[in-house]
Amino acid sequence: MTKHASPYTLVWVALSVVLLGGMAVQQGIYRKPPADAGAYHARVGSAIDDLPYTFGEWIGTDSAVPAAAVRLLRANRVFSRRFMHMSTGQSVQVLIVHCTDSRDLIGHYPPVCYPGNGWKSDGQTPAALGVPGYESIDSTRYEFKQGDQLTERRIAIFNFMVLPDGQIVHDMDAVSTASQDYRRKFFGAAQVQVLVPPDLSLDEQTQLAAQFVELIDPVLREIQSGDL
């Protein structure tokens, strides 16, 4: 005598098929980068490569980036350039890290990276940068110190993140949100740091950081053009 499956069994079979089908779709489609992400990343990379070595009286030289850091971040580009002012001898360093997957950028920003390399936090404050073409760029200004009273070194960093949907944000919250969206995460995100002389006044530091953000404006615009 043939036994007929109960209605409950049929329901569970149907649900299993749906769930397995959903998993297949997720693994086969949703975990693959969108086709247009590659072209977008190439444009961003070219914009970073085209950044100039001279800026008014400032002359730039590239700073070495540890290969291990590049591999860890799986970055599309890591830009690290130190600019020296020909008259004053002041120096400003600009760092841009652009990752093709926004998940790779999470956790890699000043409150984590600098203490991990022997620097002690000496405070952080919001800092609005006045850059032509923007109402304002919200950043966070971090201070770190290293050594004792006789050998103390200090650094001041203006930091912000740029997302392909046009956002420029001062912390990692928006990057974390983007990393949870299957499409947005594959368009990546970028982090920008501008290290300025710590002995300048706060106003002077902020103005100087804004000048160098203006220098990299073509990169910011390209990153923001993800058309999500």
Image: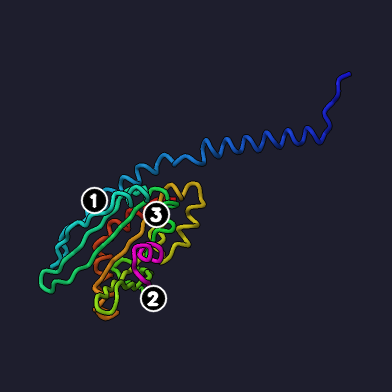
Q: Amino acid at mark 3?
A: Ala
Q: Which quadrant of the figure has residue 94?
A: bottom left
The residue lying at 33 percent from left, 55 percent from top is: 97
Q: Amino acid at mark 2?
A: Gly
The image shows residue 185 at horizontal and vertical percentages of 45, 50
Q: Which residue is mark 3?
A: 189
The image shows residue 122 at horizontal and vertical percentages of 37, 75
Numbered disc 3: secondary structure? strand
Q: Residues within 10 Å of mark 1 (few under 14, many from 20)?
A: few
On screen, 88 above or below 72?
Answer: below
Q: Which residues are magenta?
A: 111-123
Q: Nearer the viewer, residue 109 or 192?
A: 109
Residue 123 disc label: 2
Earlier-in-chain disc, 1 versus 2 = 1
Numbered disc 1: secondary structure? helix
Whether residue 173 sits left or right of residue 1 in the image: it is left
Q: Amino acid at mark 1?
A: Asp
Q: Which quadrant of the figure has residue 136?
A: bottom left
Whether residue 228 sits left or right of residue 23 in the image: it is left
Marks 3 and 1 sit apart, C-alpha to C-alpha, by 17 Å
Tag nearer the camera, 1 or 2 = 2
The residue lying at 24 percent from left, 64 percent from top is: 93
Residue 95 disc label: none
Q: Which residue is mark 1?
A: 49
